[in-house]
Amino acid sequence: MYKEITPNGYGIAIETDEKPLYSRQSEFQKVEILSSRGLGNILTLDGLMMTTVEDEFFYHEMISHIPLCSHPCPERVLVIGGGDGGTVREVLRHKTVKSVELCEIDGLVIEASKKYLPTIAGKLDDERVKVYVEDAIEFIKDKKACYDVVLVDSTDPMGPGEGLFTEEFYTNVKNSLKEGGILAAQSESPFANPREMKMMYKLLNKVFKHVKPYAGPIPTYPGGYWSWAFCSESLDIPEIQDIERSKEIEKNSKLYNTELHKAVFCVPNFVKEIVKDA
């Protein structure tokens, strides 16, 4: 049985096999793959839920298609974190994309995902993908006007992900974007992690001219509800730029469609309250 309990005293429980399929301690964290009865294989880092085979589309479609469909022609994309490969897989569904760079600090996450999560990680060997097993904080420092879209698919602001929640890091990300570029970053659960979410939006608002939260469900994350930050220097309203491409993405998506694209930015009042003074 896998359990994750938040500091607020609630969480999730999933029936799993007693012995992990994969369990190794890296330089940064404990990487495990668990086998479950109803959700397929599960990736956890230091005991915290990252993704499951059955519900991963909630996260990966939200972090990728909302920003990419808001860009008129995304060709070069950087994914920071995201070693399970799900975000890369979704990015490659956009016919305009010519190259995807993945910067993941922990090679064991990639190793485990390729072996035990093939439906998620199966595109990491695509010829358009370049994988860097590096610290993104250093990787991004010298990148200037390189990317159309940057996706920060990070862990929570602790352990190896802690350094990705700083003004310096996001300033370097902004500098790495081409004119008209877009950043989308996971921005925590407004229900389970409101303090961390407010902290993150304060940072983002110092760096970017336009910052908007969008949100949706993730069944296996504690609280069941998650947010992402949409950031741009030029785009105030994250509208679909190429309706034909968005409709093509919609055809083979479990979550994303053109109506949802508009709706996810209509966040509830308690989310607005968290970010209003950020």
Image (cartoon, rainbow, N blue to C red):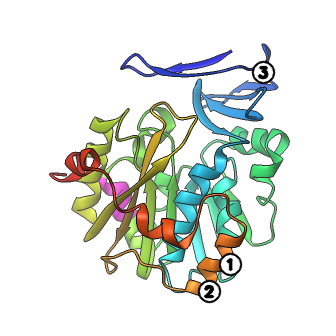
Mark identifier at residue 13 = none
In this rendering, the label closer to the viewer, 1 or 3: 1
The image shows residue 6, relative to residue 211, as above or below, that is above
Check disc 3: other Cα within 10 Å, few if <14, some if 14-19, many if 20+.
some
Report whether residue 99 is seen.
Answer: no
x then y, percent, for residue 206:
22, 60
**Type of residue at label 1?**
Glu
Q: Which residue lies under the disc numbered 2?
A: 244
Q: Is residue 91 left or right of residue 137?
A: right
Mark 1 to mark 3 CA distance (whole Å): 38 Å
Q: Amino acid at mark 3?
A: Pro
What span is in magenta? 167-172
Q: Quick one: label 2 or label 3, which is nearer the N terminus?
A: 3
Q: Is residue 253 left or right of residue 4?
A: right
* Side of 205 relative to 88 (left or right): left
252 above or below 198? below
Mark 3 = which residue?
20
Q: Earlier in the sequence, mark 1 or mark 3?
A: 3
Mark 1 — residue? 248
The residue lying toward the viewer, choosing from 131 and 157, is 157
| Label 2 with label 3: CB-CB less than 8 Å | no
The amino acid type, in three-letter code, at marker 2 is Glu
Relative depth, front residue between 22 and 95: 95
